[in-house]
Amino acid sequence: MTTIAQPKLLTDEQMKQFITDGFLILKTDFPREFHEHLVEQLNNIYDNEGNPGNNILPRIRELQRVFENPVITGALTSVLGPNYLLHTHRHGHYNSVPKPGGWHKDSYWGYDRLRNHHPWWAMIMYFPQDTPLELGPTGVMPGTQYQDQRNFVSDENAEEATAKGEAGTFALIHYDIWHRSTPNLLGQPRFMLKFEFMRTQFPTAPTWDNKANSWQEIADGSELNGVIGEEVWNWLSGRTAATANTQSGDAAEIAALLEAVSKTDQEPAALTAAYELARRGEAGIAALLQAVQDENKRVSRAASYGLSVAGAGAVEGLKALLDDSSEQIVNLALFALSELRDLAESAVPAVAGLLDHPSVKVRRTAIEALGIISSDAAAVVPALIKGLKDEDTQVRFTTGLSLVRIGSAASEAVPHLAEVLDDENRYVRGHALEALRYIGTKEAHEALMQELFNTRWCSDTTPASTF
């Protein structure tokens, strides 16, 4: 039986860099022969069969060893907690052209969703061959995981960081960071194997090799996103909204911060002001509740991030907004309540009631919030069962993830998840399977094993060898 080594957890310094910059460049310790064989298989498959897409992991069975490597398990455990989930979507990116790719943020469901400042998702971008700059490694723009807008103009930006390095180098990136492929000037095949991972539980304590007691112990004042970074550090340490309501502010200061939130052409400054208002007690929360109702979507989004870290004092005001006639305002209030986690437990009945809302966007956010806010299965599982039957694919997909987060207490959902295994969408089916795995009852395992047996995949079957 294979023994998986203990994860090599990130240090406080590495976590600070990830929180600040949104990425880390790390390297696994496999022998060169492992990567040479991996590249040989990739070349053969891409030349003769094309891109295997989501089947790249079962098609190349040795690739599973990459995700058992202690450097990778340690990085993912540090950022996403020990029970992280490997997403059904994975992809092998092939690049042999001298033209750079466009800057983008990943999203299977489109760009209109609210991006998470807290690391609920992360990606591994793995390079199985030596990848110097001239071969076109992935490029990332540091700190932009906290920015919706692309505020950098030139494609040749001096601040761009790349995942260049020897075979086995990988980038651990915040899912919502701006990134691209850089030009391959050598014209030789360059593979990048991309895998997505998701947090299944909100943090209750640090899961990295934590020695520092606070952000201030390791911050030197030069890092990007300092105010946001402190809050994310606290969140990852299990301290929800730990910096909320810690400072007083007079009327003039509150007004100045509120004005800064409205300057949407300066997104980093607007977000910093929103986070600062979250620290200013009732007056700051009142200002954010005003701003979240602004007609300018960029102003309201910035305010929602402030409210998402404003603590228990923001809950009643956010609950009141769930009855608003504006889809935008309701959606932002739901997002902020979900990020407040169990502090927003009293909002669960109102959130569950929104599963009948005519807006698909609202239903999507509500179904995700239910899996984060409450661990009370009796309060949320009936609503999540309803979500499995929603007409919208993303609602059903997200419902599976919310049931993963509820875990064994969601056993009532097992027969409904079994029905979803016939869904037309691969990711709805994938998350239903994961939900059955995390629920883990005898009935859940029976449904899971029957489906996996029926759909088992042969890694040796190719167009050249069909049986």
Image (cartoon, grey):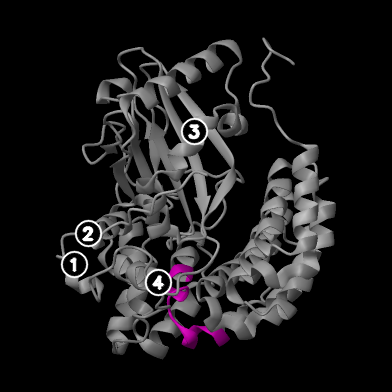
State the separation of the CA atoms marked 4 and 2: 17 Å
Compare residues 309 and 55 and report the one nearer the observer: 55
Look at the image and say whether residue 315 sits in the magenta stretch: yes
Q: Label 4: state its secondary structure.
A: helix
Depth check, mark 3 against mark 4: the one in front is 3
State the separation of the CA atoms marked 1 and 4: 16 Å
State the separation of the CA atoms marked 2 and 1: 7 Å
Looking at the picture, which amino acid does disc 2 mark?
Glu
Looking at the picture, which amino acid does disc 4 mark?
Trp
Height in image: 426 above or below 344?
A: above
Q: Position of residue 269 (x, y in %)?
A: 30, 63
Compare residues 251 and 336 and report the one nearer the observer: 336
Quadrant where the C terminus is found in the figure: top right
Dominant secondary structure, magenta: helix
On the image, numbered disc 4 is attached to which residue? 235
Q: Position of residue 168 (x, y in %)?
A: 34, 33
Q: Which mark is residue 13?
A: 2
Q: Label 2: state its secondary structure.
A: helix
On the image, numbered disc 1 is attached to which residue? 218
Q: Position of residue 15 (x, y in %)?
A: 29, 59
Tell me if mark 4 has few (under 14), some (14-19) or many (20+) residues whose alpha carbon lies within 10 angstroms of its own. many
Q: Label 3: state its secondary structure.
A: helix
- Segment tinted magenta in the rendering: 304-316
Q: Position of residue 55 (x, y in %)?
A: 62, 31
